[in-house]
């Protein structure tokens, strides 16, 4: 049951993430076609670069996922800045790989969203979208944890009830055995007395 709940929670968040990425990609493509009202920040990656990497992360094998994570982590440490930190936060927020860390991603994304002047509109949109997904993921995981705890408590309660019942049955069996042994002793005594009387006659 625990494994099932975990898989359901991870699958629901992953589907929401991929759907959100697709919608955001289309929206960003539509807005970028105008181009006039978009702020230009030198060195800022295109939104599609982020989305393509997140897609590779979500669909890649463990080796690919580890490579993407380590590269993003290294970039964020060696060349810290809004773009590298956003990239790393997006990867941390993406479910389905070993380094997924919703709480850290949530903290990083909130910090980045304070620095609006250092992010392009596309990066702002990605950060806000992913923050919402992270928060949903955390709610799902919290609910899954609550259900596991409830299930565990129920199992413990049921086990305690079974143990109590078994102890009661064992005590009853012991009492009956003692009564049976006592009755057999009395019967043996009566039989001995009757035998003695017959012998005297």
Image (spheres, rainbow, N blue to C red):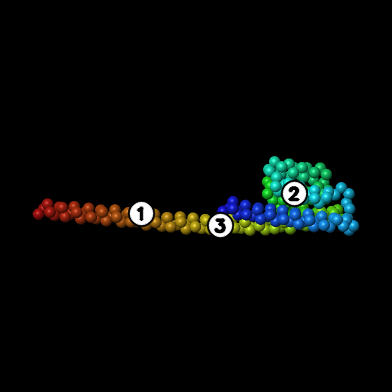
Where in the figure is residue 65, as x and y percent of width and height? Answer: 71, 44
Where in the figure is residue 51, as x and y percent of width and height? Answer: 77, 50
Q: Is residue 32 left or right of residue 173?
A: right
Indicate which disc residue 151 carries: 3
Foreground label between 1 and 3:
3
Q: Is residue 136 above or below residue 78?
A: below
**Mark 1: few, some, or many residues within 10 Å (few <14, many ≥20)?**
few
The residue that label 1 is drawn on is 174
Q: Is residue 38 visible?
A: no
**Mark 2: few, some, or many residues within 10 Å (few <14, many ≥20)?**
many
Q: Secondary structure at mark 1?
A: helix
N-terminal of the pair, mark 2 or mark 3, is 2
**Mark 3: few, some, or many residues within 10 Å (few <14, many ≥20)?**
some
Residue farthest left in this picture: 201
**Residue shown at 59% from the left, 55% from the top:** 148
Indicate which disc residue 54 carries: 2
How far apart marks 1 and 3 lie (CA) works out to 34 Å
Q: Is residue 65 above or below residue 134?
A: above
Where in the figure is residue 84, as x and y percent of width and height? Answer: 81, 47
């Amino acid at each position: 049951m625990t494994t099932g709940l975990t898989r359901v929670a991870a699958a629901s968040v992953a589907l929401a993430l991929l759907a959100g990425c697709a919608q955001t990609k289309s929206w960003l493509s539509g807005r970028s076609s105008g181009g006039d009202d978009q702020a230009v920040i030198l060195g800022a990656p295109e939104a599609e670069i982020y989305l393509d990497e997140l897609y590779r992360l979500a669909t890649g094998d463990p080796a690919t996922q580890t490579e993407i994570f380590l590269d993003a982590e290294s970039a964020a440490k060696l060349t810290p800045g809004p773009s590298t930190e956003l990239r790393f936060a997006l990867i941390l927020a993406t479910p389905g790989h070993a380094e997924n860390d919703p709480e850290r991603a949530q903290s990083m994304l909130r910090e980045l969203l304070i620095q609006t002047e250092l992010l392009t509109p596309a990066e702002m949109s990605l950060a806000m979208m992913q923050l919402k997904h992270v928060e949903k993921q955390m709610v799902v995981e919290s609910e899954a944890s609550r259900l596991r705890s409830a299930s565990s408590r129920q199992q413990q309660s049921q086990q305690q009830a079974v143990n109590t019942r078994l102890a009661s049955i064992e005590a009853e069996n012991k009492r009956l055995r003692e009564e049976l042994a006592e009755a057999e002793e009395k019967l043996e005594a009566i039989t001995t007395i009757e035998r003695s009387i017959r012998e005297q006659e």
